[in-house]
Amino acid sequence: MKRGDDLDAVLDETQEFFEQLADHSESIACTFIVHLWPIAGARIGMHDVCDSIMLWLTNHHQPEISTHLRHIAANANLEWVRLRFRQLVDGNFL
């Protein structure tokens, strides 16, 4: 097992946990899963995780999720993360 495989497995398991959490509270699950996106986005080969997170966000329209995404778009440390979340919010995905 390569060193990066451990992180990949952790990301997959964490995503699965949030998907199960969504059965109880979609807004809480979405609020947390959004923070996996920059981690997976920085990993080569984790496009499947990034894509599924973006699908989640575009399919869940609760106001608290939109508010959280606006906060990330305004305050993330990494410019590419701010840009992507601005696109989500401005693109009327939510």
Image (tube, helix red, strand yellow):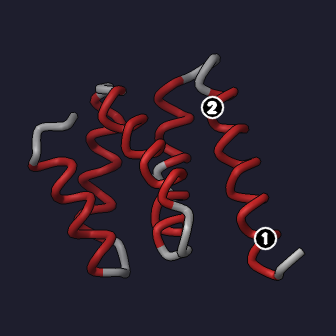
Where does label 1 land, which residue?
A: 5
**What amino acid does circle 1 point to?**
Asp
Q: Of residues 30 and 15, which is closer to you in this image?
A: 15
Q: Quadrant of the N terminus?
A: bottom right
Where does label 2 land, which residue?
A: 19
Image mark count: 2
Does residue 60 appear to the left or right of 31 in the view shown?
A: left
Give the Cα distance between marks 1 and 2. 21 Å
Write the residue at 46% across / 54% down: 50
Q: Quadrant of residue 3?
A: bottom right
Lower sequence index among marks 1 and 2? 1
The image shows residue 53 at horizontal and vertical percentages of 46, 45
Write the residue at 54% across / 47% down: 33
Instruction: Determine whether 79 is above or below 89 in the image.
Output: below
Instruction: Determine whether 82 is above or below 4 in the image.
Output: above
Q: Residue furthest right?
A: 1
Mark closer to the observer (1, 2): 1
Instruction: Determine whether 50 is above or below 24 in the image.
Output: below
The image shows residue 44 at horizontal and vertical percentages of 54, 75
Does residue 24 appear to the left or right of 86 in the view shown?
A: right
Q: Quadrant of residue 54?
A: top left
Q: Which mark is residue 48?
A: none
Write the residue at 76% across / 48% down: 13
| Label 1: how many Cα within 10 Å (few below 14, some 14–19, many 20+) | few
Q: Quadrant of residue 93?
A: top left
The image shows residue 48 at horizontal and vertical percentages of 51, 51
The image shows residue 81 at horizontal and vertical percentages of 33, 70
SS for dot 2:
helix
